[in-house]
Amino acid sequence: MIRLQTSLWRLIVPIAFIWSVSTDMFATPSKRPNILLIMAEDMSHRVGAFGDSVAITPNIDELASRSLLYPNTFTTAGVCSPSRAAQILGRHQISTGTQHMRAKAFKESSYRSVPPPNIKAYPELLRRAGYHTFVMNKLDYQFSDVFIKSGPFSIWDYEGSSQYWNGKSKDQPFFGFVTYYETHESKIFPKAVNKSNASRDYDRRVLPSEVTVPPYYPDHPIIRNDLANHYNNIQEMDRLVGALLDQLEKDGLADETIIIWTTDHGDGLPRAKRELYDSGIRVPLIVHWPDKYKPESFSSNGVDNRLVSFVDIGPSVLAMAGVEAPSYMQGSAQLALTGTPEREYIYASKDRLDEFSFRERAIRSKQFKYIKNLMPNKPGATHLKYRDQMPMMMEMWRQFESNTLNESQSAWFKDRPEDELYDVINDPYEVKNLAYNPQYASALSQLKQDLGGWRQSMKDYSDIPELEMAQNFWPDGKRPRTAPPLLEVRDTNIVKINPAQEHDSVDYRIDGGKWILYSEPFISEGASTIEARAVRYGWAASKKVRLKLE
């Protein structure tokens, strides 16, 4: 319904846009930085700047040479969708119903996650504060599908595979989120490798003889070949990052842009991706600050060994933009604000993966990792149809079934105990479970207690069966539709848009122009038509409402 009112409406807020910007970092809105988040897929610390002598990553290494490196950064899951959901919302996936891989693949009742209605993706908060926001190539945060233009319209001004920052207005800062697929697990599958080898022109490739084989893999030519292919995919990703940074420089924006480079979780390899070991959740992270925006106490380059969680990225980006992080975010501005208390722990979770059910929770300090298996006596390795396409996975299955793997290599294929404890300093590959060693009883007890406290501090959506959760989100398996907003016009040229539900996101456009995220009443003088729409995350967008002005 559209309601017209002609009586004078006294507004208690200015009609002009109000910048909700903190003055702690930037004196005026015109000084706000651009922020560019670049994310590779399925990749651990295989970068020269992070100490890997095999990796061919000249562009990322050059960026790192003038940036801060955070080697102790951890995702909240070892797989794409839950990790990306936590990153974009600033909350652990188990607290928003985005924990399973994937929501739409649940065979009993396909659904999309529906986070609590007041929780918004941080790019939407930036957009509300006047930033131009864009995303390239991938969404995959559970209340969307995998690829662009499948999620809430309110988060991004632009979704595509090109354009970059070109859609912003003059002097408008931007936040961009760019994903590169080249390092994805699937790029090691034989067909993808053959296609890549035919199309890429490398000066030098990483050879199988050059790679280091972790102790949880057998040293076999197939294993080495897949590891080398992974490195060569990383080299291609590095080339694309270099091209993007060159374009930023060419467009005169390099000195105005904070750059963050990271990956969405650990290596896309067996016993890494999907797991809570460091091979699955520990990722490299780089932050480059232009001098004019760098906090005084921050170094221009170097290494910061603090623990960083993916839920810290949202609060950090908001702080970089001078926007206050909402209280519902579970992270802190570890990457942005001087004096932010350092973390004692990071936390991670593992739930359903494709057709197999799991439930694991992990806590990690700088020295110890504790994994609680809430569904124990199940093997870590399962015949995931997708992963089994990888040659090294097929070879590992063959060797396990022929009983030729050693203890460290076969442990992943065997039933897992309820408790796992690792000294990650002395056992970085996490192959020596200390949970049942009396010498480590004190460390185990402390981590159990602290993990239990963390779990009690939030609503864990896995406490209810997934089918019940899915039905709560999408009753009868049908996607609900957001109700349309209500437009009010008073004194003929002041427009207020009211969502049908308090926390629905709303945008509007005037005379068929650009869609604008609604935050305040506005003047419509000279306009002939106004259109508006609303959306709740995980639901279908409302139908558009259209108002002709007299």
Image: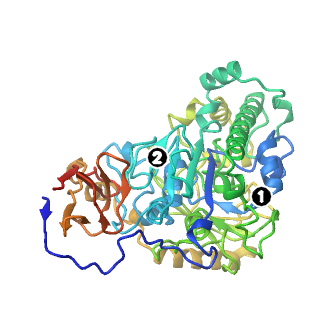
Q: CA distance from mark 1 to mark 2?
A: 41 Å
Q: Is residue 3 left or right of residue 180?
A: left
Q: Secondary structure at mark 1?
A: loop
- Measured as percent of width and height from the top left, residue 362 is found at 59, 65
Q: Is residue 268 left or right of residue 288?
A: left
In the image, residue 398 above or below residue 22? above
Nearer-the-camera pick, 161 or 75: 161
Q: Which residue is mark 1?
A: 428
Query: Looking at the picture, does residue 79 appear above or below residue 289?
Result: above
In the image, residue 227 sits, relative to residue 179, either above or below, namely: above
Q: Is residue 380 visible?
A: no
Q: Amino acid at mark 1?
A: Pro
Which image quarter is the C terminus in?
Answer: bottom left
Q: Is residue 198 left or right of residue 477?
A: right
- The residue lying at 28 percent from left, 56 percent from top is 526
Q: Earlier in the sequence, mark 1 or mark 2?
A: 2
- Per the rendering, the mark at residue 158 is 2
Disc 1 packing (10 Å; few <14; some 14–19; many ≥20): some
Q: Residue sitting at 56 percent across and 47 percent down?
A: 165
Secondary structure state at the residue bearing disc 2: strand
Residue in the image at 57% along x and 57% along y: 171
When the figure is inspected, residue 98 is found, relative to residue 21, above or below; the finding is above
Q: Position of residue 333 (x, y in %)?
A: 61, 72
Q: Position of residue 82 (x, y in %)?
A: 49, 54
Would you call the spot at circle 2 few (<14 residues within 10 Å), some (14-19), or many (20 or more)?
many
Q: Amino acid at mark 2?
A: Tyr
Who's the residue at 52% across and 73% down the image?
21
Instruction: Indicate the position of residue 157 as horizontal and vertical percent values.
Output: 44, 50
Q: Nearer the viewer, residue 322 or 57?
A: 322
Q: Is residue 79 visible?
A: yes
